[in-house]
Amino acid sequence: MSQEFIISLAQQAVYTVLITSAPMIGIGLIVGLLVSIFQATTSIQEATLAFAPKIVAALIALIIFGPWMLNHMIDFTSGILGNLYKFIG
């Protein structure tokens, strides 16, 4: 195994993590921004008001994007396991 191969594998792993987590993080960010704007306009400073909608949005995003995320992770894992012989030598 060369350094280039290890770096390429690590790069693919980081890319897979970023791509699979992007929908949940993006939706959580948007909901958090909307709740913050709502709190700023109404002067309500309740901690649970900022926290609870983000959890609900993340769960909804997981339900919606879960199959796509799972397929992406399965493709990455099967690619690693399919090329396992490269890791030995």
Image: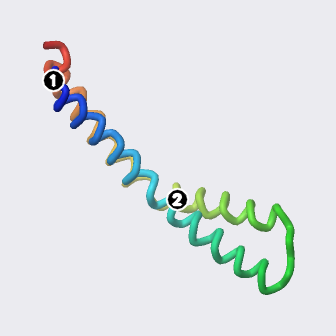
**Residue 18 location in percent, x, y?**
40, 51
Residue shown at 60% from the left, 56% from the top: 59
**On the image, which quarter does residue 85 sit in?**
top left
Q: Which amino acid type corresponds to the residue marked 2 in the rendered image?
A: Ile
Write down the residue under mark 1.
2
Q: Is residue 19 above or below residue 39?
A: above
Q: Label 1's element?
A: loop
Q: Quadrant of the C terminus?
A: top left
**On the image, which quarter does residue 57 sit in?**
bottom right
Tell me if 83 is positioned left or right of 59 in this view.
left
Tell me if 46 is positioned left or right of 11 in this view.
right
Near-viewer residue (50 or 81): 50
Near-viewer residue (59 or 16): 16
Q: Is residue 72 above or below residue 3?
A: below
In the picture, the disc for residue 25 is 2
**Residue 13 location in percent, x, y?**
33, 39
Task: Name the front one of labels 2 and 1.
Answer: 1
Residue reaching furthest bottom? 41
Q: Are marks 2 and 1 in contact (CB under 8 Å)?
A: no
Residue shown at 28% from the left, 41% from the top: 11
Residue reaching furthest front? 3
Nearer-N-terminus badge (2/1): 1
Tell me if 40 is positioned left or right of 24 in this view.
right
Which class describes the residues within 10 Å of circle 1: few (<14), some (14-19), or many (20+)?
Answer: few
**On the image, which quarter does residue 36 sit in?**
bottom right
Q: Label 2's element?
A: helix
